[in-house]
Image (spheres, grey):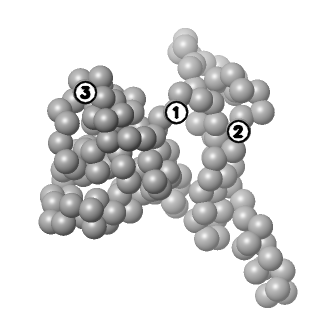
Amino acid sequence: MTLEERRTSIKEAGLRVTAPRLAVLDVLHAHPHATADMVVTAVEEKLGSISKQAIYDALAAFTQAGLLRRQVVEGGGARYEIERGDNHHHLWCERCGKYEDVDCALQQPPCLYPVDDHGYTIRLADIVYRGVCPDCQKAIDQES
C-alpha cells in the first residue's frame, strides 16, 4: 500500500489524514495481526515521541470506519489487520502466540450460522482456530 493509497483510504473513510494515522496503516500493512502494543512500539520507532492515545484513537477510528478488522482472542488480546473485504479466518497457536490467516472453506460470508439468530441479519462469522503450530508441536515432541 503506497503512501498515496493510505492517504486516499483515510480520506474516503471521512477521516483527517495525520502522521500517526498514516504510520498506523503503514505498520499494519507490514505487520498484519499486530496487537495495539505492537502498533504503538512500531509507530513510536517511525515517528519518535508520540502520544499512545493518538495511536489507540487511530486504531479505533479505522476499525469503526471499516479500514481495519479487529479480532479479540481470549488470552491473546486484540489483533488488528487491514480490512481486505475477503472471507478468511485465523489460526492461533496457544503456545507461542503465532497468528495467521487461513482461507474459509466456503468462501461466502457468513460461513456459520447460529442455531437461533434472534432476528439478526448475520453478515460475518469471525472464526479463530486454536491449537499448536507445527514448530511448537515439534518442540513438544522433542520434550517428550
Relative image position of residue 64 (x, y in whole percent):
33, 31
Residue highlighted by disc 1: 84
Please count the marks in the image: 3
CA gap between label 1 and label 2 equals 13 Å
Q: Give the residue type that dot 1 points to.
A: Arg
CA gap between label 1 and label 3 equals 17 Å
At mark 2, the secondary structure is strand
10 Å crowding of disc 1: few (<14), some (14-19), many (20+): few
For the point 76% across and 80% down, the residue is: 139
In the figure, is residue 60 to the left or right of 80?
Answer: left
Residue 79 visible at all = no
In the figure, is residue 119 to the left or right of 16?
Answer: right
Q: Earlier in the sequence, mark 2 or mark 3?
A: 3
Q: Earlier in the sequence, mark 1 or mark 3?
A: 3
Q: Give the residue type that dot 3 points to.
A: Lys
Which dot marks residue 113?
Answer: none
Residue closest to the eye, 21 or 96: 21
Which dot marks residue 11?
Answer: 3
At mark 1, the secondary structure is loop
Residue 142 visible at all = yes
Relative image position of residue 78 (x, y in whole percent):
44, 52
For the point 61% across and 71% down, the residue is: 96
Of circles 2 and 3, which is in front?
A: 3
Q: Quadrant of the C terminus?
A: bottom right
Residue closest to the eye, 9 or 136: 9
10 Å crowding of disc 3: few (<14), some (14-19), many (20+): few
Q: Give the residue type that dot 2 points to.
A: Asp
CB within 8 Å, label 1 to label 2 = no
For the point 18% across and 66% down, the residue is: 48
CB within 8 Å, label 1 to label 3 = no
Q: Quadrant of residue 18?
A: top left
Residue highlighted by disc 2: 103
